[in-house]
Amino acid sequence: MLVLDANYILRYLLNDNKKMAKLAKDIILKKHCLILNEVIAEVVYVLSGVYKAPKDVIAATLTDLIMLENFTLYESKTLMFKALIIYQSKNLDFVDCYLCALGEKHQIKTFDKKLLKCLGD
């Protein structure tokens, strides 16, 4: 199984370097790939911070990506889908959205008022 970093995923999604994008596309669409949660968080950070992509576009794009059958996430895909839904609808950064999604199964300790509100919803 291949483990992809954020840069590899970004080249595929953005197609901003044709040579790298083609290499990434060949791997992403044809090989069994493992994506770490931290890599998804980094992709969200770059897309929102550097490329100023709207949350709904980021959430939809990453949902489509992780739905690929040859993709395995370090955690469950269901948990990541939930985090992306929260990210799209709440005024939280992605890591807090992921923690909020984890809050359905685990007790999350935080002093962050926005995260506490999300956990209480």
Image: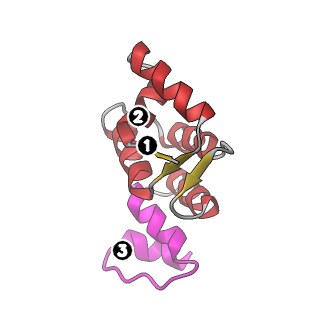
- Is residue 6 something one can see in this rendering? yes
Foreground of the two, 44 or 89:
44
Circles 2 and 3: CB atoms closer than 8 Å: no
Spatial separation of the CA atoms under disc 2 and disc 1: 6 Å
- Label disc, if present, on residue 8 of the rendered structure: 2
- Is residue 92 something one can see in this rendering? no
Foreground of the two, 48 or 21:
21
First reached walking from the N terminus: tag 1 or tag 3: 1
Neighbourhood count class around disc 1 (C-alpha, 10 Å): few under 14, some 14–19, many 20 upward? some
Q: Position of residue 103 (x, y in %)?
A: 51, 77
* Amino acid type at image mark 1: Leu
Asked which secondary structure carries label 2, the reply is: helix
The vertical placement of 21 against 61, above or below, is: above
Q: Which residues are magenta?
A: 94-121
Q: Which residue is mark 1?
A: 4
Q: Which residue is mark 3?
A: 113
The vertical placement of 67 against 90, above or below, is: above
Magenta region's main secondary structure? Answer: helix
* Amino acid type at image mark 3: Lys
Q: Position of residue 54 (x, y in %)?
A: 47, 37
- Residue at left 45%, top 69%? 99
- Magenta span includes 103: yes
- Residue at left 53%, top 48%? 1
The vertical placement of 115 against 109, above or below, is: above
* Comparing labels 2 and 3, the label whose residue is closer to the camera: 2
The quarter of the displayed image where residue 112 is located = bottom left
